[in-house]
Amino acid sequence: MLRSCTAGLRSLWALRGGREGVPRPSTDLQPAPRLFSAEKVIHTDCALPNPSWSKDLKLLFDQFMKKCEDGSWERLPSYRHRCAQISEDFKNYFLEQKPVKEGRLSQVRLFTRGFEDGLGFEYVIFKNNDEKRTVCLFQGGPYLQGVPGFVHGGAIAAIIDTALALCAAVPGKAIMTANLNINFKRPVPLCSVVVINSQLDKLEGRKLFVSCNVQSVDEKTVYSEATGLFIKLDPEKKSF
Ligand SMILES: CCCCCCCCCCCCCC(=O)SCCNC(=O)CCNC(=O)[C@H](O)C(C)(C)COP(=O)(O)OP(=O)(O)OC[C@H]1O[C@@H](n2cnc3c(N)ncnc32)[C@H](O)[C@@H]1OP(=O)(O)O
């Protein structure tokens, strides 16, 4: 498996050198939006297939795209730089906050989209609004290694947090993770594809309770199970 990762890396670098439109790391600093800027910025949607996606990931992606045809499921787009709408949702709560120095703003990226194609988090999330659930198809690349040959637990936590956040997300409202509990039951092989099934279990005032499992594509292996608590930020509280 590690050999195939290394081979994959080499071919990715080769691809990067030759593929038009795939920027080199040093120049991949697109003109990013100012944090919390209302300015609309168009960026590349990362939740679409790229050459690093394995056959399994492409196959599952196609299956879910078919499910989107009748409108019951939707694919959630995903951007490297925070999209204008999400920034709008949060800006009222962080009025005084200047988290990033001017000179570094162009480097700001969403953590799970901060790697070059295929090296880190490759994923796409589909949402079924009626059933209040999401499915995240995730391929953990070679830069996410923890124990040799397996995905780092912190990387698994990050993709679980992302999947649960988007399951809990309420349009126009800002939410944050208050609690995340994960049982790591089996290690996730590096460069493999796993499926994260999340659901909204309960809504209690500002509290959104969600849970998920992380399974192999054939559903025979449960790698992790998790629960999360997300809180809708209170517009009356601006003390962050
Ligand atoms: C999420 C992002 C969506 C955007 C999508 C982008 C895509 C990428 C997705 C990336 C995703 C990345 C996501 C990230 O990385 S989010 C980053 C990681 N999270 C944080 O940094 C959050 C830090 N914490 C806070 O800011 C505050 O504590 C929050 C805002 C969470 C609540 O402070 P607030 O002052 O507003 O609320 P409250 O204290 O009055 O509490 C309200 C109620 O909640 C209950 N409670 C609170 N905490 C806990 C707890 N730990 N266990 C159990 N219960 C808890 C509490 O008892 C009370 O209940 P009740 O008394 O009313 O019954």
Image (cartoon, grey):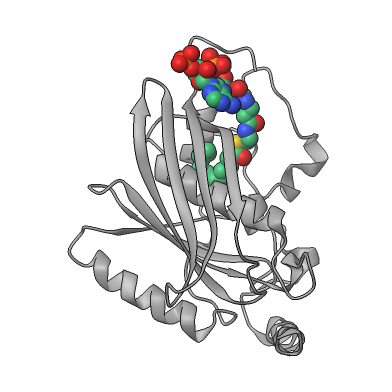
Q: Is residue 23 above or below residue 33?
A: below
Image coordinates of residue 207 in percent, x first then y, are 43, 26
Image coordinates of residue 81 in percent, x first then y, are 60, 50
In the rendered view, does 30 fall on the left or right side of 145? left
In the rendered view, does 61 fall on the left or right side of 110? left
Image coordinates of residue 147 in percent, x first then y, are 78, 67
Whether residue 18 appears in this view of the structure is yes
The quadrant where residue 113 appears: bottom right
Q: Is residue 29 above or below residue 138?
A: above
Quadrant occupied by the N terminus: bottom right
Image coordinates of residue 200 in percent, x first then y, are 36, 41
**Could you say which is closer to the camera, residue 192 or residue 232?**
192
The quadrant where residue 168 appears: top left
Q: Residue at x 42, y 22 (%)?
A: 206
Quadrant occupied by the C terminus: top right
Whether residue 234 appears in this view of the structure is no
Ligand 1 position by quadrant? top right
Q: Residue at x 62, y 43 (%)?
A: 33
Q: Residue at x 60, y 80 (%)?
A: 52
**Could you say which is closer to the camera, residue 105 or residue 176?**
176
Q: Is residue 126 above or below residue 169?
A: below
**Could you say which is closer to the camera, residue 113 or residue 103?**
113
In the rendered view, does 132 fall on the left or right side of 180? left
Q: Residue at x 63, y 12 (%)?
A: 239
